[in-house]
Image (cartoon, rainbow, N blue to C red):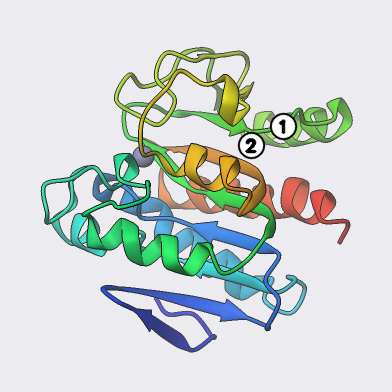
Amino acid sequence: MSLILKKRKAGTIYYYQKGASPVLLLLSGTHGDEFGVINPLKQVINKYLSKLPDFIFIPEVSPSAVKKRTRRNGFKNDVNRNFFEKTKDIEAKANMEIVARYKFKLGLTFHEDPQLDSFYLYDSEIMSSKLLHTFKAHIKEQNIGLYSGIDDANDVSLGNVLDDGYITVPAHAKKIIHGDFWDWSLLNGYVKRLLCPEIPGKLGLKNKTFLVDLIFKDLIFPLLNI
Ligand SMILES: [Zn+2]
């Protein structure tokens, strides 16, 4: 499905932009085996287009990985280990050039955990208990589980322990994984606060769309005071 906004090209990737002063950054398609969240995200962005503040949306951070539907991209890289100065990965480079033009108040990098049917969320700051409580209650009402346990050892935040679907992971406190978007965007100040929802890969399209929609209603709008 397409987005109402005009497609823009940057090197090998494409993106969408609303307005001249984007405060919100939306990413998906970093890992090609996590393509299932891309269409729900496009659908929800279209739904809230007039309500959303100025934003940039990069639906396929790694188009070559999405095309192959594999974690590694067409250059045999995990693009999420290639966000650093002098990177040789042309996809990471194209993303960095777009993101580094702005200072985003809030960024969301949508991933999927292919092994799971329950949800979890990384947050670079501490969510207010009121927001978090409401968000979790709505997930439970939909009969979707909240994951507790160790995150995917192969993913962005190796060895973090999730508690009831949520964890705060400040960039500087993380175990060092060179080149992930989390550290690069936060430590350079391009994104003030970053959320990484891990949409459960084993859920159907309806529940994936429900979760993405809920993230906009219960988190993005309140966090941006909309
Ligand atoms: Zn991922």
Front-most of 85 and 222? 85
Image check: 78 left or right of 176? Answer: left
Front-most of 38 and 23? 23
- Mark 1 residue element: loop
Does the beta carbon of the residue at mark 2 sit less than 8 Å from ligand 1? no
State yes or no: discs 2 and 1 in contact (Cβ < 8 Å).
Answer: no
The answer for how far apart the CA atoms under marks 2 and 1 are is: 26 Å
The circle on residue 142 is 2
> In which quadrant of the rendered view does residue 56 lie?
bottom right
Q: Give the mark, 2 or 1, whose residue is nearer the N terminus.
A: 1
Does the beta carbon of the residue at mark 1 sit less than 8 Å from ligand 1? no
Front-most of 35 and 75? 75
The circle on residue 218 is none
Image check: 212 left or right of 24? Answer: left
Image check: 167 left or right of 138? Answer: left
Crowd tier of the residue under label 2, counting other residues whose Cα lies within 10 Å: few below 14, some 14–19, many 20 or above:
few
The image shows residue 226 at horizontal and vertical percentages of 86, 61
Q: How many marks?
A: 2
Q: Residue at x 67, y 59 (%)?
A: 104
Q: Circle 1 is placed at which residue position? A: 125
Q: Is residue 191 above or below residue 141?
A: below
Three-letter residue code for mark 1: Glu
Q: Residue at x 74, y 46 (%)?
A: 219
Q: Is any atom of residue 182 visible in this view? A: yes
Q: Is residue 94 above or below residue 85?
A: below
The image shows residue 88 at horizontal and vertical percentages of 21, 54
Quadrant containing the N terminus is bottom left
Check the image and name the residue furthest to the front.
Answer: 86
Three-letter residue code for mark 2: Gln
